[in-house]
Amino acid sequence: MAAQILDGKVLSAQIRDKVAERVCALKEQGVNPGLAVILVGNDPASEIYVRNKEKGCAETGILSRTIRMDAETSQEDLEAEIGKLNADPAIHGILVQLPLPAHLDEQAALAKILPEKDVDGFHLVNAGHLMTGTEGVVACTPKGALYMIRSTGTELSGKEAVVIGRSNIVGKPMAMLLLQQNCTVTVCHSRTRNLAEHTRRADILVAAVGKPGFVTADMVKPGAIVIDVGINRVDGKVCGDVDFESVKEKAGWITPVPGGVGKMTIAMLLSNTAEAAERTLSRE
Ligand code: NDP
């Protein structure tokens, strides 16, 4: 039987609707949530992502401010801009659009964002919170992927979860979130031997590799939940890391690309921004 589709459009709309309600409640209490996005240079893919974020803010009532900086911007100027936003009470979330031009130090820039305004969840303090299971900001893409997994209603405790990819922004935080759900988690990467032997055991399989069609049906356990994080462009068309057509015949649930995890990432960014604004109220 063909897999059920985990529709990112439907699931992300649920989150955006809740964010819009939370934003209304915040405004009633005098807080107008604000998200600032710093865009350095004019990478076309980044321009699209930034426009989608502005659109998401408009739909949920979040104030959006985009700071465009020249491709030649110095590290000092970038960090000075982050410092200004850190000090600005109208801004609750700060996001530096990645990748930055090669001459800039991404890690150093991200470290300058106040952890409580780090709505991407990339700051070392927030990575540490996730690692230790304490309250912090959770990275948007893995948070969105977990929402999709949980939307299946499957009891996750004790399940075998396999994550392919170990990046700091997707693979590792995804593994941590699944561990918190009491899954038995295996993280695979480019040096993993006999990859398919691992993936075939997975009740939950997350692909975050960046290689089109990398996960094929023979690598998937029948009935598995398959989450495709990959965003690849082939002949101008966007596709994921999973060979959707073959895998959908074997999996129990599957996310499409486009229309899957990507939609959830933006919804979780808006949710993290509302959360950051809510925290300012609880600090008062
Ligand atoms: P990275 O390139 O940072 O990480 C890719 C991971 O895949 C690495 O850990 C790498 O292993 C592993 N890998 C590469 N080749 C193999 C292989 N042959 N077998 C097993 N593992 C392999 O990518 P990201 O994590 O940043 O992103 C992954 C994908 O997700 C990309 O397509 C990206 O565009 C997409 N993405 C989508 C988002 C969304 O909103 N949907 C958000 C962020 C990313 P090693 O560590 O050993 O090199």
Image: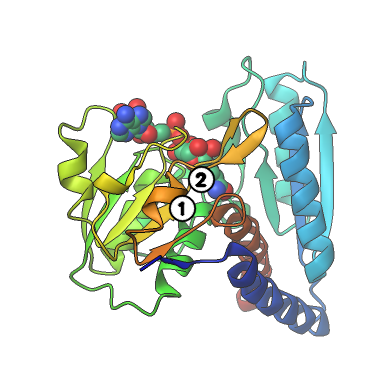
Q: Which mark is residue 118?
A: none
Quadrant of the rendering where the C terminus is positioned: bottom right
Question: Residue 221's x, y, as percent?
Answer: 23, 57
Contact check, label 1 and label 2, Cβ < 8 Å: yes
In-front residue for pair 39/245? 245
Residue 34 placed where, x, y %?
A: 78, 60
Estimate how packed mark 1 is, as few (under 14), some (14 to 19) or many (20 or more) residues with alpha carbons within 10 Å. Answer: many
Which quarter of the rendered image does ligand 1 occupy?
top left
Residue 209 in picture, x, y percent from top left: 41, 36
Circle 1: residue type:
Asn
What secondary structure is found at the residue carrying circle 1? helix
CA distance for labels 1 and 2: 7 Å
From the viewer's perspective, is residue 91 above or below residue 86? below
Q: Please state which amino acid type lies under the numbered disc 2.
A: Phe
The vertical placement of 130 against 113, above or below, is below
Q: Is residue 14 above or below residue 233?
A: below
Label 2 residue SS? loop
Asked whether residue 154 is in view, the answer is yes
Residue 112 appears left or right of 87: left
The x and y percentages for residue 73 are 77, 20
* Most foreground residue, 177 or 215: 215
> On the rendered structure, is 259 left or right of 46?
left
The image quadrant of residue 215 is top left
Please identify the quadrant where the N terminus is shown.
bottom left
Between residues 242 and 52, which one lies in front from this camera angle? 242
The residue at the point 21 percent across, 38 percent down is 195
Up-down: is 279 above or below 43? Answer: below
Q: Which mark, residue 126?
A: 1
Residue at 46% across, 52% down = 126
* Disc 2 target residue: 122
On whether ligand 1 comes within 8 Å of the CB at mark 1, the answer is no
Residue drawn at (37%, 58%) of the image: 249
